Amino acid sequence: MASRDTRREQNQKLFRMGNERLSDVIDDRLPQAARVPFLCECADESCDGRVELDRGQWEIVAAKPNQFVMVPGHARSEGEIVVGALDGYDVVRKPA
């Protein structure tokens, strides 16, 4: 059985994969500056939060595989720290 931290990390990876797919689908369909309701990339498997960012903002966070964007106060995995904010959303980093 997977540990709680392992499940949390798996949840974040699933949310990230969903956001990557969303970004791919809208790539040629929306202007770069259009706000997109990306999934909150927190560790809570039942989270239905959204982080509305333009693709450029999201791509800056997603370019670093150990960084995630989430609604402030949402569940984080062990050791994650808030390293910044984008339009009121937390940017967190996992330890290396």
Image (cartoon, rainbow, N blue to C red):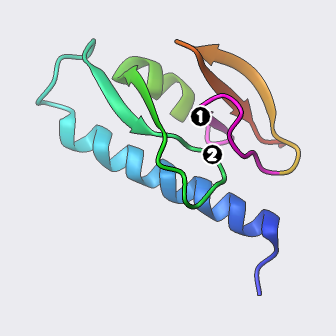
Residue 80's image quarter? top right
Find residue 89 and report its horizontal and vertical position in percent.
Answer: 58, 22
Residue 5's image quarter? bottom right
74 lies left or right of 82? left
Q: Amino acid at mark 2?
A: Cys
Q: Looking at the magenta stretch, what is its main secondary structure? A: loop
Distance Cα–Cα, label 1 vs label 2: 6 Å
> As rendered, which of 76 and 47 lies closer to the eye?
47
32 lies left or right of 82? left
Mark 1: few, some, or many residues within 10 Å (few <14, many ≥20)? many
Q: Amino acid at mark 1?
A: Met
Whether residues under marks 1 and 2 lie with C-beta atoms below 8 angstroms apart, the answer is yes
Residue 14 lies in the magenta stretch: no
Find residue 85 and report its horizontal and vertical position in percent.
Answer: 64, 16
Q: Which quarter of the image is occupied by the N terminus?
A: bottom right
Q: Residue at x 45, y 27 (%)?
A: 59
Residue extent of the magenta highlight = 63-77
Question: What residue sits right under mark 2 in the picture?
Answer: 42
Q: Is residue 24 placed above or below 89 in the rendered structure?
A: below
> As rendered, which of 86 and 57 lies closer to the eye?
86
65 lies left or right of 16? right
Question: What residue sits right under mark 1 in the picture?
Answer: 70
